[in-house]
Image (cartoon, rainbow, N blue to C red):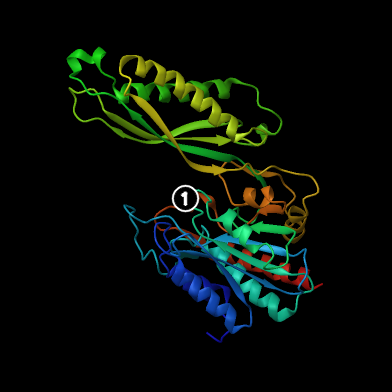
Amino acid sequence: MTDRLSAREILAALIQFPTVSRDSNLPLIDWVEEYLGTHGIAAHRHWNEDRSKAALFAHVGPDEEGGVILSGHTDVVPTDGQDWTRPAFELTEADGKLFGRGTTDMKGFDALAIWALVEAHHAGVRRPMQIALSYDEEVGCTGAPPLIAAMQGVVPRARDVIVGEPTTMQAVTGHKGGISFWVHVHGFEVHSSILYKGVSAIMEGAKLITWANEVNAEQAAAKPSDLAALFDPPYTNVHIGQISGGTAHNITAKDCEFGLGFRVVPGEDPLSWRERLLDKVAEIEAGMKAIRPEASIEVVDTFSLPTFVPEEDNSAEALVRQLTGDNASHHVSYGTEASHFQATGYKAVVCGPGDIAVAHQPDEYITVAEFEKGRHFMRRLVENLSA
């Protein structure tokens, strides 16, 4: 790999690695590290606990603080059960589109970032550029905090972060946070004809689900704050996406399990929603234990993402607006790693090629035009850092 690859060639290389979050991303990380090394760029790794995955970061330009980080994730969502009409892990082109898992979310940006880093290195930029590629974004953005921590003291601290999630190259300056839980309701089995002597985990769990619906109705009816009004919907909502339980129709359910999560608007504390949930759990559990002391409700924290709050004097936002010409206001309800960077003192903005509407879909694609739009953005960024 001594050649200076085009952004499209780099994308083709990245797509061939099936870096689904449940699997290792090490072959991809090996490839990126080797490719950067052939251009004299030293890359650093941060390993996960069992060393089955690694994040990668690198720095080019002067050995000084104040640079720009291009932030992306290497994992993709599964293709299981999806009706793909072309190879998921091979880049193919048709009708002006580049198909493959991750083309939009977000190996398209990763490829452009790797390309730009090499270009910046050869251009001899005066302001540093860094790249930060994480793991496990798709399962809760859990790889970003240890990656950010690992960068400190190893490479000079940058100032601005461009998180390249697909925004059709618009500058997104705020998004909701999130906090999720796995709820396990432990009931007590009896014959359904003597229901009152047992505890149905399903029927007790339904009380918590009913509470979630009531909270959503309450939130929708309330007047949103000015900050919450920037989002769709303009309030924190509760969602249950999976549920299982029960043994047979004529037995009170011994177990009921489901995931429950909050999408939290900026200006609200996710932990306050956790406390509100636990208060309701305690109320329901008390009624269960009054019938059978063995009954209980177990709540396990599974995910937590800070809110990404719009802020004045955001130098990362100003840089992206300068390069794109985009002066409109954009805020989204999904989460990104931008909030973790903001929480650790960086200036952050979300801006990348592709449309979030096709992310995670079968026959995922990025248009050739959108990918080229991203490449021109990176070219302008390199020129800006070289000035």
Q: What percent of the width, then of the height, locates residue 67?
A: 74, 65
Q: How many marks?
A: 1
Q: Which residue is mark 1?
A: 139
Q: Is residue 206 positioned above or below 128 on the image? A: above
Q: Could you say which is closer to the camera, residue 21 or residue 96?
A: 21
Residue 91 in view (yes/no): no
Q: What percent of the width, then of the height, locates residue 180?
A: 49, 38
Q: Is residue 247 left or right of residue 310?
A: left
The outermost residue toward the bottom is: 2
Q: Could you say which is closer to the camera, residue 157 or residue 11?
A: 157
Q: Could you say which is closer to the camera, residue 325 or residue 45?
A: 45
Q: Is residue 207 positioned above or below 307 on the image? A: above
> Amino acid under label 1?
Val
Q: What percent of the width, then of the height, locates residue 74?
A: 51, 62
The residue at the point 31 percent across, 52 percent down is: 81
Q: What percent of the width, then of the height, locates residue 363?
A: 41, 58
Q: Is residue 364 positioned above or below 280 on the image? A: below
* SS type, badge 1: loop
The residue at the point 73 percent across, 79 percent down is: 123
Q: Please rate how many residues cluster around mark 1, counting C-alpha atoms within 10 Å: few if below 14, some from 14 to 19, many from 20.
A: some
Q: For the C terminus, which image quadrant?
A: bottom right
